[in-house]
Image (spheres, rainbow, N blue to C red):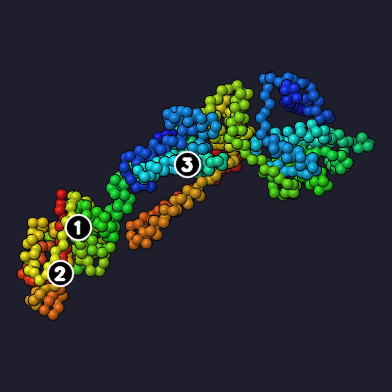
Amino acid sequence: MGIKQHRRKLASGEERTYVYEVSHEQRRSVAVVRNSGSDSVSPLFYRGEEKNRIVAALKADSSLLVIGEPGCGKTTLVDSVAAALAEAGFPLATINPATPKQILLSIASQLGTDTESIEGKALTVTGLMEAIADFLSENTAFLLIDDAHRLSVSIRCWLEELHSGGQPMLLVASRPPAKDIFLKLPRIELQPLSHRQIREIMQQAAGELGIELSAAQLAQLQQRCGGNPMLAKRVVREEYLGLEENSPDHTQWVDGTPFLIAGLMVFTIVRFIGLGLNSTSLYLIGGLVGVTVGIVRLLLYSLPKKSVRLGR
Amino acid sequence: MRSITHALFATTATSLLLGTAEPTLLLTGALASQLPDVDTSRSIPGRILLPVSSWLEKRYPHRTITHSFLATGAIALVTLPVVIIASKLWQALILGYFCGWFADVFTKSGVAAFYPSAARLVIPGNPQLRLSTGSPAEYFVMAVLILVAIALLTINSNGGILRTFNSTLGIPSGAVEIVNSEGSQYLLMAQVYGRWAIAQQSVNEKFEVVRPLTQTDLLLKDSSGKRYRTGSSQNCQIIASRILIERSSPVRLQVQEMQLTEQVVAEVLAQYQNSMSERTYINGTLTVEDAEDLVVTTHADSFNTITLQHGREVGVVQLESASPAEVLSLLGDYYASGSLIIRTVEVL
């Protein structure tokens, strides 16, 4: 159960906000229609192009895998694709990772298939899988799977089977393993957002928290976000809570250590210049530089590597 | 990083890479290192150039566009006309700017060095090991930079890294290099550590440098005026393990050429008498007539400034940094032809 909100601009120029409930039985039931100008703001959405491409691909019976780092806006993208497909009137099932049974029950309820046998007994996992597969082979419906990298093997195998049967589906994952279903689907990688977009998200987040951030503060905070909208909101919240800066979590890094060492290595040429000019001193200095660079390299490479876990 | 750290880093790098201790260049480097931080109005350059900084900070995150190879290249291009006036100044400017942002590579959030790519360049890869602004580690780096800067300034004002290396280590070939480059400007003294080639006694004495002979040997003179070939080659009188060169006083060199065509040596030398001093050295080759009775005594323990080869009726005399007194006493009365170079070192 959840509450969703959409903002529409009507032909008359009036803006309306639809707030509706998403339930298990009915996909959505419109509850409130509000005229816009209300205090609530719709979240910024910058992945329009990707959304259109995905919707078009799904409508053309193709499946897709969307990958991107955590927080880069995958779930938002799935939601908007779901909204677009629902608007076009297609039945669909949105799946979040859970136990296989829960997932299958959720799909069954969203698509409206039976969860019980003719004798009134609850279907087993295999039974549910078959029932859903049967339904999908007879009807056009879409499966949208968020956080697909967390799916269990059984569900992945089942999805793979559905995929080879021609079932269109959208898998969204961050750094999935390069195997089975993930390898078979055509892939879109979500690119980091631009500086301007991240800045807008930060401004909106600041607005929602009711704090004023100067351009200088935003520029300072934005260093820690990369192109990641989740981090953009998080750093604003950290500023709001007055937390101290910790190590940035985005993934857009270039480790300059090899460049530094290569740059220093250039100076060992002095040794050969010394050799060429028959200057013992230059030769010695070049040798000393060579040894120093060797030591620096040894030390730099023996430093502990970046931890994959948070904190020290 | 604090602006003072940037300035120190840039000063050190400018001094090291340009090999200079000139205040204008170092100051240019230090000032240019402040420029990248113009992208935030919180920094000093940002406050001075407020319109620029507020324009930049509205559009770009901190440490992006101004902290990049792109901006460095652009500034290098724009300021290219400075090369015509002062190329060193331009180098210091670009180096200072580069160092200004490159130092931020060692901070937690790094710099977008490859702008327009948003990827941030960092060294080292582990964020826990990088600096954060105002941390104790930054003050430590600052202290180290100050020490390095002082050392570099001393070295550079002493004539550069190579000169300091040579004068500290005292390798004979390094001493020759110093004499080659400074011999015409300063009277040089050489502290020699080694041994006498024949007597095998150890030497730890100070000599005056006359001139370099080969790439490894120097001609030195002691207080009594005796010359010694000193270095590492076989025919040296002093086999030196270390030669430390010191500057004594500035000098002016005077070089005169003397032509003799069957003239009496003493008469010709007399013409140059008033320009001669105790540091006058005569070089060249003379053909001496009626040289049957001419005898040149050779010394095993010191350098032979005059050598003689007997020919038929004539003698060929080679002079190598001979003093006028020696030449006069030995050849004064003879008729000779040839050309001599008289080198006089005048202490200012």
Please name whichever residue, B251 or B157, is drawn nearer the observer in this view of the structure: B251
Mark sitting earlier along the chain (2/3):
3
Using the numbered discs, state the Cα–Cα distance from disc 2 to disc 3 in whole angstroms: 63 Å
**Residue A105 visible, this orientation:** no
Please name whichever residue, B150 or A274, is drawn nearer the observer in this view of the structure: A274
Provide the chain ID for the residue under circle 3: B
Circle 3 sits on which residue?
B74
- Which residue corresponds to the image point at 10% horizontal and 66% vertical from the top-left? B327
Up/down of B169 relative to B73, above or below: below
Please name whichever residue, B89 or A38, is drawn nearer the observer in this view of the structure: B89
Up/down of B229 relative to A79, above or below: below
Using the numbered discs, state the Cα–Cα distance from disc 1 to disc 3 in whole angstroms: 51 Å
Q: Residue furthest bottom?
A: B312
Mark sitting earlier along the chain (1/2):
1
Count of numbered circles in the view: 3
- Are circles 1 and 3 on residues that touch, CB within 8 Å? no
Provide the chain ID for the residue under circle 1: B
Please name whichever residue, B218 or B98, is drawn nearer the observer in this view of the structure: B98
Circle 2 sits on which residue?
B338
Q: Residue furthest right?
A: A119
